[in-house]
Image: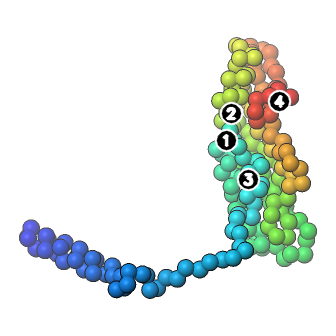
Amino acid sequence: MKNVMLGLCLLGLTSLAFAQTTPQNGNDADTDEVKLEGVTVSPLNLSYLNKVQDPHTPEEVVQLENTAARYDIKRSEIFDGSFEAYEVIFEQTDGGIVATYDREGKITSSLERFKNVALPVHIREMVYKKYPGWTITKDAYIVSYYEDLEEVQKIYKLQLKNGKQRKVLKCDSEGNML
């Protein structure tokens, strides 16, 4: 029985080896190289992603922003090309994005709000250095994107608590207090 199984395995492997053939001249006869002159391929909403995401952007935010960037408004039931802009709402458990798309499917603006995100380390460290003894009880991450503007507004709104005292802080994504 052992010899029969070994023989079947060898027979199967040899048939796989013969299935991989190449032409005599060594070139693949079935594939030709196609050169596209003057064609640049890039994702439609890459500029949106480059502006709203940075190395410190929380993972749950990145995932929903990627979903919004990949969304094809032209395949939507409501799209007929007659309107100048289309508003789409993306939601998840603790946040959402309201994105405005133009007729071509490009994001022209977005308003994003997420609650209880994992704060970047540099922001947590900044808070604990400036406010020793205080704990962060709530946080929100708010992003305002407009295609026409160079800067994207990214704000962390933090609620701190120390005993019965409470404070609300705002800082940008670099950790600068606002």
CA gap, disc 3 to disc 1?
12 Å
Amino acid type for the residue under numbered disc 4: Lys
1 or 4: tag closer to the N-terminus? 1
Which residue is rendered at x = 52% and y = 83% of the image? 32
Dot in front, 3 or 2: 3
User: Which residue is outermost to the front?
Assistant: 25
Disc 2 to disc 1, C-alpha distance: 12 Å
Q: Residues within 10 Å of mark 2 (few under 14, many from 20)?
A: some
In whole angstroms, how far apart are the C-alphas of marks 1 and 4? Answer: 20 Å
Front in this rendered view, residue 95 or 24 = 24
**Which quarter of the figure has residue 38?**
bottom right
Compared to residue 58, the image places residue 72 above or below, namely below
Badge 1: how crowded within 10 Å, few (<14), some, or many (20+)? Answer: few
Residue 81's x, y, as percent? Answer: 86, 75
Query: Disc number at residue 119?
Result: 2
Residue type marked 3:
Leu
Tag 4: Cα neighbours inside 10 Å, few (<14), some, or many (≥20)? Answer: some
Please tell me which residue is depicted at 75% across the width and 64% down the height of the picture.
Answer: 44
> Residue 175 appears at what percent x and percent y?
76, 29
The residue indicated by pointer 1 is 55
> Can you identify the residue that label 4 sits on?
170
Q: Is residue 91 visible in the rendered structure shown here?
A: no
Decide which of tag 4 and tag 3 comes sooner along the chain: 3
Image vertical order of residue 165 relative to residue 64, above or below: above
Contact, CB < 8 Å: mark 4 with mark 2?
Answer: no
Type of residue at label 2?
Leu
The residue under the point 84% across, 42% down is 153
The span from disc 4 to disc 3 (Cα, nearest Å) is 23 Å
- Find disc 3 in the rendering and name its residue: 49
